[in-house]
Amino acid sequence: MSRLSVFDAGFLAFEDASMPMHVGGLALYSFPKEVKTPAEQSEYLHGMIEKAKQVEDFRHPFGKKLERRLGQWYWEDDKGFDIDYHLRHVALPHPGRYREMFATVSRMHGKLLARERPLWESTLIEGLESGQYAMYSKMHHAMIDGLGAMQLLNDAMSSDPDERGMPMPFATRKRPKKARQPRPERPSQGAIADFSNQLQSQFGVAKGAASGVGKMLNATLRPAGNNLVGFRQGPRTVLNGEITGARRVVAQSYSLDRIKRICKAYDATMNDIVVAMSSGALRQHLFNNHVLPEKPLIAMAPVGLKARVSGKDAATGDAQMGNAVGAIMINLGTHIGDPIARLRHIQASTKEVKALLGSMTKDEIMAFTAITSTPSMLLTAAGLAPKVKPNFNIVISNVPGPKERLYWNGARLDGNYPISIPMQGMAMNFTVMTYVDSLDFGITACRKSVPKAQRLIDYLEQSLVELEDGAGLR
């Protein structure tokens, strides 16, 4: 049994039917080379399901459910675990295009996870006209973040296309180990000194975080000529109203070599280009719907401080995953029509906030993020976020993914599309993941607040072409 951190438990506190707090992913696979005919493919997929039903030892926390004791949430073994509930198998309606696949995933992503069971589900999807199959998985944000999901993916997969006999991703890869009993500690002068050092350290963290907050306050009071985004500088937009539980999920892959050429041409980072593509797509979408605000949109971008491992599960030795993130706010320059000028505006804003975080330690960044995010989180929890001026308009996450081509029992992973969490007051989310030679965009939106969200894929391509044209790359 292990207790959830206050941060992880917060995702449970904010959740309701209109705002499910799970993250997801859609993995697209080609069948192993020995699986050729439709009959063999069907047999392969049904065999996968049967293999899953034989799993007895689950990786933490896939075999654990929530328990609440004295106001605290804990992970505890689910002695009545039912694999048939957590692992599903569906076939797409004809003709089995990606359009039908994303429509199916959109419906599944809008449904809450059952709290009386372990907080995850996976759905095997067959019937794609491309000859591929897919696996849609969703896990509650209380149990995993984006970097933790990447760690899970790397642990479950192999770079060897000929490797077979690999366990299911949710199964432990190690035999249970007997937990070592810690020796009882005795009070000592060393322990007292450690406690004193901890107090001094916490004081230093608070001081460093407060310094960052002061700079943001200055940017709020003196926004003119200040590239650092202050508090409550996001305009009211259609993206920042009330949302429903219905979701629209769309995704697209872009060549990493293509992105890198643009980065070189503008002396930009990959994240600069990701943000610029997102900004251009948002500007076009809002403009076409006659709701583009005069003031620039503000994006919140999570910053992974390190894939946090919150210890080892005593029974299995598996890493226990949680959340370890900071956050920065970037001016998207959506008020600027010229795509190159918009990119430079984004670069200046990003440079300023990176300099701010660069002066802090990891603990100071986490404290700074907690201080600056708490007001927005409280407004969301109270249902007031859609009614006040937003701190930011959208979240744009860039998650580094595997650099090698990955396989699971010979099935090649062709694409891995992240699916995230729209929230009250923030109806859409962009999450981007690199994988070998591609950049995979996943866009998750509230169907009601952001109609025709699928067109954002076209606008992302348009933004990319504009940057290529500006650099003479076409």
Image: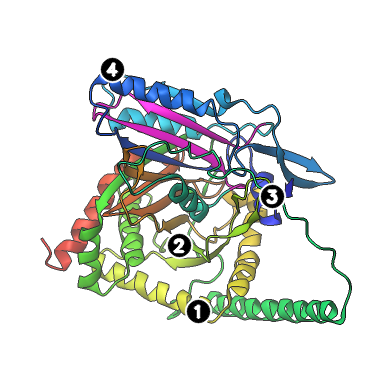
Tell which of 101 and 297 is nearer to you: 101
Count of labels in the image = 4
From where the camera sits, is residue 380 visible?
Answer: yes
- Give the secondary structure at mark 2: strand
- Residue 428 appears left or right of 361: left
Residue 242's place in the image compared with 460, above or below, is above
- Residue placed at 66% from the left, 32% from the top? 117
Looking at the image, tell me whether mark 3 or mark 1 is earlier in sequence order.
3
Q: Element at badge 4? A: helix
> Residue 92, how many percent across, how many down?
35, 22
Disc 1: which residue: 358
Residue stretch rendered in magenta on the structure = 117-143
Q: Is residue 351 left or right of residue 380?
A: left
In this figure, which residue is indicated by the disc labeled 4? 39
Of residues 404 and 219, the one nearer the viewer is 404
Q: Kindly indicate whether the residue at mark 2 contacts the one at mark 3 (C-beta within 8 angstroms).
A: no
Among the two numbered marks 1 and 2 on one chain, the one whose residue lies closer to the N terminus: 2
Whole-Å distance between the Cαs marked 1 and 2? 21 Å
Numbered circle sitting on residue 298: 2
Q: Amino acid at mark 4?
A: Ala
The type of residue carrying mark 2 is Ile
Q: Quadrant of the N terminus?
A: top right
User: The residue under label 3 is which amino acid type?
Assistant: Ala
Task: Specify which label sits upstream in the sequence, 4 or 2.
Answer: 4
- Per the model, the C-alpha gap separating discs 3 and 1 is 36 Å
How far is disc 3 from disc 2 in space, using C-alphas?
Answer: 43 Å
- Is 339 covered by the magenta stretch? no
Residue at the image point whose x is 71% and y is 79% from the top? 201
Q: In the image, is 155 to the left or to the right of 15?
A: left
Tell me the mark number nearer the camera, choosing from 3 and 1: 3
